[in-house]
Amino acid sequence: MAYQGTILKYSQFLPVNNQTPIISLNEGNTALVPAPYIAKLCKVPGLKVYLKMEGLNPSGSFKDRGMTMAVSKAVEKGATKIICASTGNTSASAAAYSARARAMGYQMDCFVIIPAGYVALGKLSQAMIYGAKVIQIEGNFDKALEIVRSLTEKYPIELVNSVNPFRIQGQKTGAYEICDELGSAPDYLCIPVGNAGNITAYWAGFTDYVRNPKDRPRMYGYQAEGSAPIVRGHVVEKPETVGTAIRIGNPASWKQALTARDESRGLIDMVSDEEMLSAYRIIHQQEGLACEPASAASVAGLIKSAHAGQIIPESVAVCILTGNGLKDPQTAMKQSDMASAEQVHKADEHSIAEVLGLLSVR
């Protein structure tokens, strides 16, 4: 049978039944790609590194794993409206799955609350073309989440942020896939931490899928230095980072992330924007893979932890690349040689050979 998405593949581990209408875009089944250059940079003998390419999901991020569950359960409940606060990826995913529900004959409207000026253009354009009603507010993501939580308590509209337990259930499937592909759990699971739902979900997934606790991975989560409330131990009122997807100062799943860290004997650390952007360039230019800046926190964190002696030899580490590289084209351009690309040269062979440095090698 052809692949039909995460709910059907892993239904025995998910809270669904024959009455659940499955709203799916064939999410999941994303590539797990070896990263030999990054493994060498870590300078740990025998280390194998893999990148889980979650940007290959239908709307371009890991959010689709949770959204297929959240929207399916919303439709099962009879909801006709969903809402979310978002730094971008959740809004794109919610809007896409609302459109899919409509394609299947259900009434479903999507509303998105975003912090003005802090959502990458690629993500904002997705939510809009999928048909969502996008509302910008003054303030940050945390204020947007506060508003939508209050609205869903007072009005007949379903919340699909990761505080929705079905989102976490759906996102567990990423852990299942990694185990299926590797034949066992990795030794380390490195993951960006923003609202902390994903690290919570992956740990729940490994707990489901790997019976022996000793065989489960250490969860290594990484926040951005300017947006690291869990690491600092207090809410960050004005979080700032180039990784807009993790620009969150008061994570909704804070306690659950600490549980994942502690139960797995892992860690939650932070990386600077400079470390994140360095890893971002490495992923693109040395591995030939693409991701958005926040995704690179997992690789930056792995390199930092490896250099600090926190990765053992002959081990396996998987880094989650949470979002597609096309989500944030502005940062990609800023991190590239735009000055050279913008130059216009004469349309003749000699001029181009000179630009390419070919004349000097004759």
Image (tube, rainbow, N blue to C red):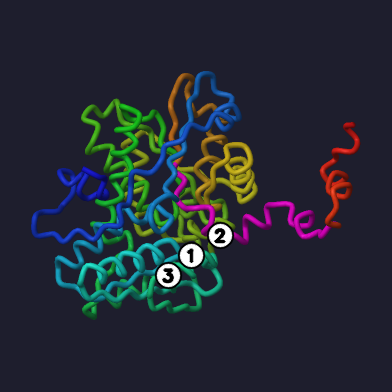
* Residue type at numbered disc 3: Ala
Q: Position of residue 216 (x, y in %)?
A: 31, 31
Circle on res. 123: 1
Residue at image point 25% right, 45% down: 2
Instruction: Report the front residue among 154 and 298.
Output: 298
Query: Mark 3 touching mark 2, by CB under 8 A?
Result: no
- On screen, residue 75 versus residue 110, left or right, reads left
Q: Residues within 10 Å of mark 1 (few under 14, many from 20)?
A: many
Q: Quadrant of the N terminus?
A: top left
Q: Which residue is mark 2?
A: 328
Query: Mark 2 touching mark 1, by CB under 8 A?
Result: yes
Residue 201 inside the magenta-drawn segment: no
Answer above or below: position of 88 versus 39. below
In terms of secondary structure, where does tag 2 sit?
loop
Q: Position of residue 219 (x, y in %)?
A: 39, 38
Instruction: Report the front residue among 23 and 296.
Output: 23
- On screen, residue 44 versus residue 128, left or right, reads right
Residue 339 inside the magenta-drawn segment: yes
The residues colored magenta run 320-345
Tell me which label, 3 or 2, sits earlier in the chain. 3
* Residue type at numbered disc 2: Asp
